[in-house]
Every structure is written in C-alpha cells, then in structure tokens.
Amino acid sequence: MLVEFEYWWLLILPLFFTLGWIAARVDIKQLIAESTSLPATYFKGLNLLIADQYHKAVDAFSEALYLNKDSLELHFVLGSLFRRTGETDRAIHLHMNLLENYELTEQQSTSIKVELAQDYFKAGLYDRAEEIFQTLRHTRYEQAALRHLLEIYVKEREWSQAIAMAIELERSSGISYRKEVAQYYCELAANAMISQDWTQAKTQLLLALDANKNCVRANVLLGDIAAQQGHHTDAIAFWKRIEMQAPEHLGLVAQKMLKSYALLYGETEPESTHTPGKGLSEGLNQLHQYLETYQISSMMSVLYEATLQAEGPDKAAKLARTELIRKPSLKSLDQLLQARAMLDDEQHDLQLMQQTVRNAIGDRAAYYCDQCGFRAKQYHWQCPACNAWESLPPEPSEATIRDIKLLKRK
C-alpha cells in the first residue's frame, strides 16, 4: 500500500537545512578554537607519527606536553610512544607521576592504571603487571585485562593458571580458546613426562583431548608414553588416530611408528640385510598407504631412508622414481640419484650429479609460521617468535622471500 505524499513536509525541509548549517558552523568554530589552543609541536608530532618517525615524535610531544602540562591526552600519547620506542622506564615514570600528583576522576585513574600495567608488561615486570591487571577484571577493561593476564601466564609457563584464565576469557568474550587450552594441558603433560609421572601425564593429555578432540599433539604424546613403557601396540594405535584428526601431521610420527612396528616383533633397528622382518614390513606397508593416500612429503623422506636401509637401493630407487613421476621435485631426484649411485658400478658421474642437485636444493626447506613468517628448522607446536599455537604447518616448505613478506603483512 502506497503512502500518500504530504505536501506540508516541503515546508519542514528548509528548516532542517537551516538548523544543520548552523550546527555545522558551531562545530567548525569549536574545532578551530580547540586547535588554536594546541601547541604547534602537537601537529608536528602528528606528522612525525604518520611518517613512522617515532623517536622524533617523542621529542615533539614532549615539548607539547611541557607547554600543556594538564592535557591527559598528551600524557597518554607520549606514554604509548615511550613503550613503542622501548623507553618503558620513562613510560612508567610518566604514568606513576599522573597517579600520584594529579587530581583524577575514577575513570581517569583506571585508564592510567591500564597504561601503567602495559608499561610493566612491556618491561617484562610481569608480577607488577599482573597485580594491576587483576584489579581491572571487573571494570570496562576486563577483557583486555584477561587477555594480558593470559599472555603473562603463558610467558611465565604457569599452565594451570593459563587454563583457568583462558576458560574465563572464553566465557567473557564468547571467543573459543579450546585449541589453546588443549595445548596448555599438553605442556603440563610434557612436564610430567620429564619427571616420568606417566599417570599424571596421561590425565593431562586426556583433558587436552576433552578440550579439543582434534588436538594432534595429545595423541602424539600419548603414543610416546605408550612406547616409552613398551606398549607398542597402544603407541601405534594412538598415532593412527592422527589420521582422523589431521592426516597431514602423520609425517611427525612416521619414524616412531616404524620403530614401534619393529619392536612389536622384537626386531631392532633395520640392518642392511635387504630382508626386513615382519614388524618392519608391516610398518613400511602402513607408511606406503599413508603416502599414497595423503601424499605427505615428510612421509616420503622417512619411507625412502627406511626402504634404502631395510630393502636395499633397488627398492629405494623404484620408490624414488615413482615419487618423481607422481610429483617432480629436486628432493626426489636427489634420492633417486643416491640409490642409483649405490647400484651402478660407474658411480662417479651419478655421485657428481647427486652432489650438484644437493647444492641446488641447499638448506631452504623449513617450517614457516603462517602468523608472523618465523622460519624454524624443526617443528614447533608454538611459534617461538609470535607465540601463536599450531601456526607452523606440519610439512616443511621452501618459502621464497616474497612468500615471507606476504606472511608478515597478514
């Protein structure tokens, strides 16, 4: 149904236009009045911030604050700049001076405490930062305080407190911390394993899986514990569960699985007899199946080395050739050349070609964090640079400089 147009609305439109014009004029006059009361160094500091010249901006805002000592906003800006430039002692002194020597409202005092807590945190004075953040838990800064407290407990490796804080933060923010909680339980389990408290370690790992059923690390460690206790059937069963969680991680346990398969039948490390025992044969067949199904590069490396040692260079060469046809790579070519050099009488040319390939490959393969681009030669569950959990892919890659730059922009 259409609404009939009321012509008297046309009389109101000019009135609205006039009121809007007046309001705009008032706002412009107020803005001009406020801007003229600010020292010129304030605008100089803003220009330096835009140009990312933080140390020069510190000098400009310090001068502006000297000319306008009562401006809390300038105090906040300067304190933040001190933290950014690493001058945390100056930031702490500035915010302590505000709390001790200025008459502040409760809201202003709370805001300054937030800044001071961040100063302590940046300075590595976690106990002092924690004390202040604890007082902010029931203020409008609660979620920020909880996040900082969680980060403090992680940095100090206080895993039980980190679990409690993550659960509280999850309830407060509605954001899931299941992945992180599971990793904290795994850290507790790892500590228990060091002291060989297997019961406690298993308890923590089951809690990790309860928090996150897709926690690969929990099954890796459960398998490690079973193998350590000589329960190799259980160990293999735990590692096989990874296929249902994230099969791309199977390469992390491939070598362990082979060893447990061999020990199931009392076999030791594979010898160059070219006749693997029953256990090792089962293990090799299992890895072959994983390689065919999921095409995991690290699985191929383990399988090739085991095949070369247990079944000889002929079988290893066939494996490398098949992989080279399926997925051409310098790594597979290197393996093929190595096996062929062991088979042929005229080895010198093949060894020379293999060495050339290895020199071309170099040492570029590594694990690159998808959050910050950190490069690691071995797999980490937590990035050593940005502390993100499970941010490194399970398979090493040969990332280019361009790839790393793109990662850092995320």
Image (cartoon, rainbow, N blue to C red):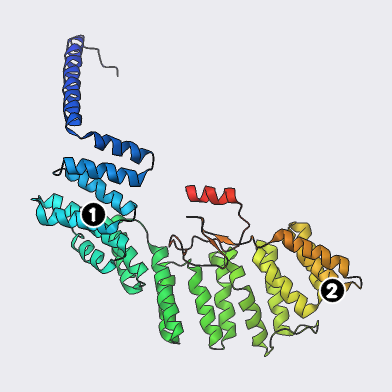
Count of numbered badges drawn on the protein: 2
Q: Residues within 10 Å of mark 2 (few under 14, many from 20)?
A: some
Camera-side mark, 2 or 1: 1
Can residue 171 be seen at all in this image of the molecule? no
**Residue 323: % across, % down:** 75, 62
Per the model, the C-alpha gap separating discs 2 and 1 is: 66 Å
In the rendered image, residue 60, in percent from the top left (x then y), is placed at 27, 41
Q: Nearer the viewer, residue 50 or 341?
A: 50
The residue pinned by badge 1 equals 115
Say which residue appears at 53% left-offset and 80% top-offset. 224
Q: Secondary structure at mark 2?
A: helix
Residue 341 vs 2, above or below: the answer is below
The answer to which image quadrant residue 196 occupies is bottom left
**Which amino acid type is marked by label 2?**
Met
Residue 245: x, y in percent?
A: 53, 65
Q: Residue at x 44, y 60 (%)?
A: 386
**Residue at the bottom extreme of this rendering:** 266
Query: Residue lying farthest right?
Result: 345
- At 87% across and 65% down in the image, what residue appears? 349
Residue type, mark 1 in image: Glu
Task: Label 1: state its secondary structure.
Answer: helix
Question: Is residue 229 toward the left or the right of residue 20 in the image?
Answer: right
The residue lying at 61 percent from left, 78 percent from top is 256
Relative to 348, is 74 on the left or the right?
left
Look at mark 2 in the image and give the residue it sits on: 342
Tell whether label 1 touches label 2 (CB within 8 Å): no
Residue 148 is at least partly visible in this image: yes
Other residues around mark 1 within 10 Å, as few (<14) / some (14–19) / many (≥20): some
